Image: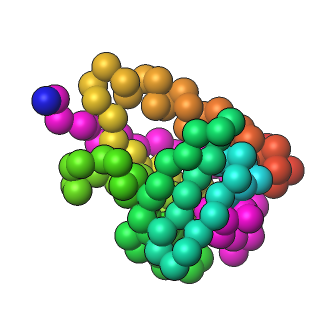
Amino acid sequence: MDKKIKYEMEFPLQVSPTLLYQYLSTPSGLSEWYADNVNSRGEHFSFIWEGSEEAAKLLSRKSPERVKFRWLEDENEQTYFEMRIQVDEITQDVSLIVTDFAYEDEIEEGKMLWENMIANLRQVLGST
């Protein structure tokens, strides 16, 4: 089987890091832009899209900086997806750094999916 490849994307957002973190780390926040519905029990999250459900484990979180999940169906324990908030020390500009993994022939599709998701997030936040 092919190995998944790590990729990163950066999205500038005009929002406070604390508010953004709420949308990345809580089921209610994630339900507003990432999935149709999100439920959690401790470190186990279930993401629901149009009737299909995917389970993920929360690997780590650090408020208000980052959250890191791993899909439970993914047999490779080295893969994960992480959303990291980065604030420029000088300008105070906020960026969301997304790290994810995909097979080589699915990376472009994965990037397009993230771009659409972040467009949803921007709309919810009222950010440009």
Q: State left or right for residue 12 relative to residue 56.
A: right
Q: Residue at x 62, y 47 (%)?
A: 48
Residue positioned most to the top: 105
Q: Residue at x 16, y 29 (%)?
A: 2
Residue 44 drawn at (x, y percent): 48, 68
Query: Magenta stretch?
Result: 2-29
To which quarter of the image does residue 63 belong? Answer: bottom right
Q: Is residue 27 magenta?
A: yes
The one of 128 and 35 positioned closer to us in this rendering: 35
To which quarter of the image does residue 27 belong? Answer: bottom right
Q: Residue at x 60, y 34 (%)?
A: 115
Residue positioned most to the right: 126
Q: Does the rendering let one see residue 117?
A: no
Residue positioned most to the front: 51
Image quadrant containing the C terminus: top right
Vertical arrangement, residue 1 with respect to residue 91, above or below: above
Vertical arrangement, residue 44 with respect to residue 4, above or below: below
Q: Is residue 119 magenta?
A: no
The one of 81 and 89 positioned closer to us in this rendering: 81
Q: Residue at x 33, y 42 (%)?
A: 101
Q: State left or right for residue 86 relative to residue 26.
A: left
Residue 51 drawn at (x, y percent): 65, 39
Q: Does the rendering let one see residue 13?
A: yes
Residue 37 drawn at (x, y percent): 70, 53
Vertical arrangement, residue 27 with respect to residue 101, above or below: below
